[in-house]
Image (cartoon, grey):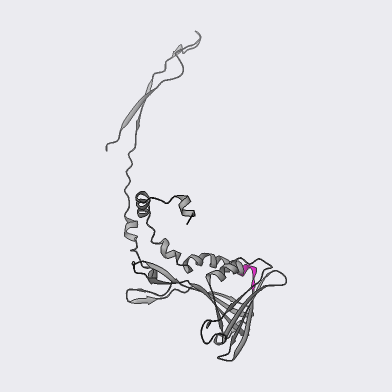
């Protein structure tokens, strides 16, 4: 499109001036001036960079942070947090499991969890990982830990064989108690394994700063452990708008009266 031109006339605000007779300049005349402005033309082109970078839709298993494959190369992403002191504590999230239903959709068959691994110290900053003990925190137990105050305590009990014939042969107790000076909490894991004739307790003090880091990591990973990330990545705004326009939303009274 050719550029457009516009013009307007600029007049002086002073009329013709009459000076005294003794002045060499009797009068001064101001002539109107005409200024011409050019309107600039700007054109923008939408880049197709983002279309080229778009990622095809994936199944919930592919969206999980478990092991994946890329072509001929398989890899696994590890997100492990290590805390060290009188013992070593390793914190690692484990992804949820999905199952395929008859309609072709996926559902969460098993929620993810956070795996705690504690190893006793055998020297200065040396730990015996061959004697490590493990404890799996469920989504609900993570919520309890995140809600602990400076003077709060909690205790979890696990029996891996609960409901089976071997029930009671392995008992695990995880106690979280506040430190006397209020600077953090003690994590004490006691494992009683009658199958291996093991009764061992491993404890490690966790400072308030380390608890803040743990809570931040828990807060981030919780939606993934619940499988909500798989749902979020399948939400299409265009489909949602069409669905809202074509479907009749339920009456609030009927919805609450179910």
Q: Where is residue 256 in the image (x, y as percent from the top left)?
A: 49, 54
| Residue 232 visible in the picture | yes
Q: Which residue is drawn at 34% across and 51% down?
A: 242
Residue drawn at (59%, 79%), measured in percent from left and top? 88
Residue at the image position 32 percent from the left and 59 percent from the top: 52
Q: Can residue 63 be seen in this view?
A: no
Magenta highlight: main SS = helix
Residue 207 colored magenta? yes
Q: In which quarter of the image is residue 122?
A: bottom right
Vertical placement of 152 versus 2: above or below? below
Of 201 and 214, which appears nearest the observer? 201
Quarter of image, res 170: bottom right
24 and 136: which is toward the camera: 136
- Asked if 118 appears above or below 37 in the picture, the reply is below
User: Relative to the observer, which residue lies in front, 106 or 256?
Assistant: 256
Q: In this view, does 23 lie to the left or right of 203?
A: left
Residue appearing at x 42%, y 75% in the figure = 76
In the displayed structure, does residue 71 sit left or right of residue 141? Answer: left
Q: x, y percentage for residue 31?
A: 39, 18
**Residue 199, percent across and down?**
62, 88
**Quadrant the N terminus occupies:** top left
Against 62, residue 252 (above or below) is above
Q: Which residue range is magenta in the image?
A: 206-210
Number of marks drawn: 0
Considering every residue shown, the one lying at the far right of the view is 181
Residue extending furthest toward the left: 1
* Residue furthest to the top: 21
Task: Residue 174: say if magenta.
Answer: no
Residue 218: percent from left, percent from top: 54, 67
């Amino acid at each position: 499109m050719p550029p457009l031109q516009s013009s307007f006339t600029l007049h002086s605000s002073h009329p013709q001036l009459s000076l005294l007779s003794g002045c060499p300049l009797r009068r001064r005349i101001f002539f109107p001036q005409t200024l011409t402005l050019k309107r600039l033309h700007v054109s923008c082109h939408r880049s197709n960079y983002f279309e080229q970078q778009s990622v095809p839709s994936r199944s919930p298993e592919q969206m999980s942070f478990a092991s994946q494959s890329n072509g001929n190369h398989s890899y696994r992403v590890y997100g492990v947090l290590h805390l060290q002191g009188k013992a070593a504590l390793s914190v690692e999230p484990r992804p949820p499991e999905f199952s395929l239903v008859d309609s072709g959709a996926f559902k969460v068959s098993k929620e993810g969890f956070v795996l705690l691994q504690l190893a006793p110290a055998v020297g200065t900053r040396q730990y015996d990982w061959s004697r490590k003990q493990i404890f799996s925190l469920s989504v609900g137990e993570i919520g309890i830990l995140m809600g602990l105050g400076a003077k709060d305590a909690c205790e979890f009990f696990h029996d891996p064989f609960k409901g089976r014939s071997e029930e009671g042969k392995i008992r695990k107790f995880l106690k979280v108690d506040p430190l006397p000076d209020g600077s953090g909490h003690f994590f004490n894991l006691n494992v009683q394994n009658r199958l291996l004739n093991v009764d061992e307790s491993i404890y490690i003090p966790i400072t308030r700063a380390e608890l803040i880091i743990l809570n931040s990591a828990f807060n981030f990973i919780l939606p993934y452990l619940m499988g909500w990330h798989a749902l979020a990545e399948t939400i299409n705004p265009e489909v949602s708008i069409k669905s809202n326009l074509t479907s009749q939303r339920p009456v609030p009274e009927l919805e609450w009266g179910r």
